[in-house]
């Protein structure tokens, strides 16, 4: 209608991060909710779940960055379950702010405070540049471990996605090791776009911690991590192809 005013679009409102999530009381709540949040889903859908490489973390001391390839909404649940207690008792997951930290949603599990408290998540602003990982940096400085999927989103192809530079920046700035973990089989259980999962085998391969010297540059660290994970990705693809032919 001529002369009518155009109503402004209502932009989503976000909440978090929540520094209180590392308080002792918050850790107790998260530990008490672990079965509801993580274990029951992994037990239901990962049949069987095979974990290799746990012994590589026995000598790990202090905070670290856990990275993994991103295939499914089950990734963080399985990754958490596969890690030793000394890491997951103080572990926090990066989660996309525009998906998991939006105010005003009615479902309990989608409340930003619930994400921070029960899941141990913290928001990452997609496309937010260096400041997008300010809370992750703060967590590491407090002695916490953080888990980040460096591809940034779940893959829909057989190719390992390119890694963003955030993990490399954090590792170099905070002087902490990176622990690559390869997840296999989860895309078949719940691929991107599917609302429901189906049972099937899953495999977690924990690689050894990697520390980077002060002289290394961010692109070099990113490429090193991607190449290591891509080698495991190709290896698991070859194993799957050989199994199909046998």
Image (tube, helix red, strand yellow):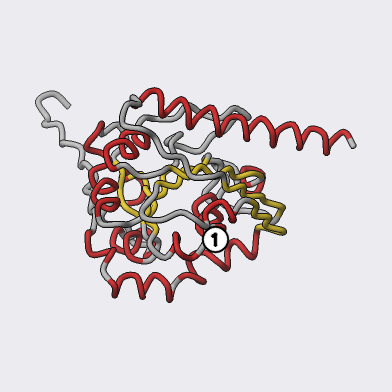
Figure quadrant of the N terminus: top left
124 to 45, vertically: above or below: above
- Residue at left 62%, top 47%? 205
- 76 left or right of 137? right
Residues 1 and 237: in front is 237
Figure quadrant of the C terminus: top right
Where in the figure is residue 133, as x and y percent of width and height? Answer: 27, 41
Please tell me how many numbered marks the rendered image carries: 1
Q: Which residue is mark 1?
A: 81
**Which residue ends up furthest to the right in the rendered image?**
246
- 124 left or right of 52? left
- 193 left or right of 18? right
Which class describes the residues within 10 Å of circle 1: few (<14), some (14-19), or many (20+)? some
Element at label 1 = helix
Where in the figure is residue 10, as x and y percent of width and height? Answer: 20, 42
134 to 44, vertically: above or below: above
- Residue at left 56%, top 30%? 160
Where in the figure is residue 101, as x and y percent of width and height? Answer: 30, 51
- 168 left or right of 76? left
- Residue at left 52%, top 54%? 57
Where in the figure is residue 129, as x and y percent of width and height? Answer: 25, 31
- Residue at left 23%, top 50%? 138
């Amino acid at each position: 209608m001529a002369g009518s005013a155009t109503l402004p679009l209502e932009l989503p409102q976000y909440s978090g991060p929540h520094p209180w999530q590392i308080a002792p009381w918050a850790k107790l709540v998260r530990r008490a909710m672990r079965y509801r949040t993580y274990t029951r889903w992994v037990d239901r859908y990962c049949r069987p779940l095979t974990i290799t490489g746990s012994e590589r973390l026995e000598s790990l001391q202090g905070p670290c960055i856990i990275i993994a390839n991103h295939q499914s909404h089950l990734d963080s649940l399985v990754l958490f379950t596969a890690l030793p207690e000394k890491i997951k008792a103080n572990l926090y997951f990066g989660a996309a702010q525009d998906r998991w930290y939006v105010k005003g949603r009615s479902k309990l599990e989608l409340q930003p405070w619930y994400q921070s408290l029960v899941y141990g998540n913290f928001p990452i602003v997609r496309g937010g540049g260096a400041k997008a990982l300010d809370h992750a940096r703060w967590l590491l400085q407090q002695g916490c471990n953080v888990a980040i999927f460096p591809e940034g989103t779940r893959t829909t192809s057989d190719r390992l996605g390119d890694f963003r530079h955030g993990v490399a920046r954090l590792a170099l700035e905070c002087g902490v090791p990176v622990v690559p973990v390869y997840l296999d089989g989860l895309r078949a259980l719940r691929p991107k776009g599917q609302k429901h999962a189906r049972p099937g085998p899953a495999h977690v391969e924990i690689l050894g911690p990697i520390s980077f010297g002060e002289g290394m540059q961010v692109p070099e660290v990113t490429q090193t991590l991607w190449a290591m994970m891509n080698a495991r990705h190709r290896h698991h693809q070859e194993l799957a192809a050989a199994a199909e032919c046998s």
